[in-house]
Amino acid sequence: MGNIVAFDLGASSGRALLGRLTDGRIEITELHRFSNDPVQVGDRLHWDILRLYHEIKQGLLIAKNQGIEVNSIGIDSWAVDFGFIGKNGELVGNPYHYRDRHTEDIMETLFAQIPASVIFGRTGIQFLQFNTIFQLFALKQANSPWLQADNRFLMIPDLLRYFLTGEMHNEFSNATTTQLFNPVKGDWDAELLRLLDFPASWFGDVLQPGSQAGMLQASVCEELGIPSIPVYAVAEHDTGSAVAAVPATDRSFAYLSCGTWSLMGTEVHKPVINEMAQKLNFTNEGGVEGTYRLLKNIMGLWILQESRRVWEKAGKSYAFPELVQLAGAAQPFKAFIDPDDALFLAPGDMPSRITQYCHQTGQQAPETVGEIVRCILESLALKYRYVFEMTERLSGQRFNGLHMVGGGIQNTLLCQWSANAIGKPVWAGPSEGSAIGNMAVQWIAQGEFQDIWEARQVIRDSFSIITYEPEAQDLWADAYDQFLKLTGMTE
Ligand code: LFR
């Protein structure tokens, strides 16, 4: 069977995975893995988009040098970020990182102009200060030279696809995360664009996942010495690809895509846009085959990743398994944080911010590395319970367990504690969820699978899924009460 390649770009690393279908099973092989290092320039934080493009080409070269004939490729990445292409076809400026501080405090300024309820009502997207709508608004307020009416707006995978193919398209799953797309109309929201004074000419046609979005252009083929191949628009928002790969059997299922972010929710066929969804700040992000992800962002392993970076800078390097081991040995339930407190969004010294949070909430702060990691992981698991129950309430469903996908499932302690916290089984796997979902959409487009449900069946048969049964439920139920009290969350 043909070979396809999924490029999956995460906030700290990217990979090129080769996918093959043999005897009804998916086999994946890593061709290339590279770091994705955000670059701070003065006060601003950027993505190194040209480096990412270089690494994508490296991935194609590696395949060629291994004698692999690639039939098609797809790219997925984090959402919301973008660049502009100028009239001369060139990139205008270096895309900003969504954790850049330029959108701090911007939400209220925008709401004074357009009420939050209008924006939510037209888009169904949760409010996060880094959503594209707020980034563009901040750029406009700063008179950014990017915002010429004849420039074209492309999101990160759109940009990379454009460099490869020379064609400019916006992909659907990512477009919905801008908070400028109207899921009911199925197009950019003309009224919001008018209210914001954003030219409609920035935004192009929106391709559904599974559409062919061009072929490798001649200059790329010449440079790499490879034949031209199709480039597919997949679910280019990595969370969209991850959820496409959830190996559920039940059509009503809850998932947690676990990585730098923890994205928890369920799949729905119609966006849920009502007062409760806005109050609980749930989102409706576009997915594959007309589905939507009714979900909520939880800060995720970011807090741990940043803590590790701080310890490393201080000369103490820890591997993740070592951190998990230290957490396992530390005293349970010593302190709790709300991982989604605004304190934890921007890069920085998380251990100090955890101390600050604990002091503000009258708790004794964790001190040792093990205690700090334990505090982060326990608080995440408890926050999962909170959001799991909200998802049930909002969607009117009861779930009999939780599917966890993504690199975070290598943290077995977190998987076990998640099961303990929600009091239901966790089914963990596959860990390369986004890349596999990216492949699934390419295979559906090529007629290898009939639809996403057939793909999910094959994913279930191809990868090992580990079940974690809940343990120590009474202790975790008590901890949950304390967590709610100390973090000020109400049910
Ligand atoms: C996860 C993710 C989330 C999105 C965040 C920022 O990688 O794509 O879904 O909210 O990154 O783009």
Image (spheres, rainbow, N blue to C red):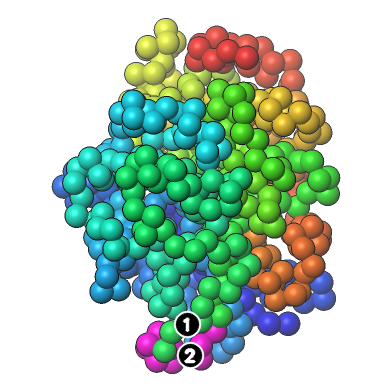
Q: Residue 481, can we see it? A: yes
Q: Which mark is residue 350?
A: none
Which residue is under mark 2?
Answer: 226
Closest to the camera, between mark 2 and mark 1, is 1
Drawn side of residue 94 relative to residue 243, left or right? left
Instruction: Name above or below for residue 391 compared with residue 7.
Output: above
| Within-10-Å neighbours for mark 2: few <14, some 14–19, many 20+ | some
Q: Residue 339, can we see it? A: no
Q: Nearer the viewer, residue 463 or 253?
A: 253
| Within-10-Å neighbours for mark 1: few <14, some 14–19, many 20+ | many
Q: Is residue 41 magenta?
A: no
Instruction: Name above or below for residue 491 compared with residue 56.
Output: above
**Residue 463's x, y, as percent?**
74, 59
**Residue 332's x, y, as percent?**
58, 20
Q: Is residue 228 magenta?
A: yes
Name the residue located 81 percent from the left edge and 62 percent from the top edge: 454
Q: Which residues are magenta?
A: 219-229
Drawn side of residue 96 relative to residue 226, left or right? left
SS state under label 1: loop
Amino acid, disc 2: Ile
The C terminus, quarter of image = top right
**Residue 331's x, y, as percent?**
55, 20
SS state under label 2: loop
Name the residue located 40 percent from the left edge and 66 percent from the top edge: 159
Amino acid, disc 1: Leu
Which residue is under mark 1?
Answer: 216
Drawn side of residue 454 relative to residue 199, left or right? right
- Indicate the quadrant where residue 438 lies: bottom right
Instruction: Name above or below for residue 323 compared with residue 424.
Output: below
Q: Are marks 2 and 1 in contact (CB under 8 Å)?
A: yes
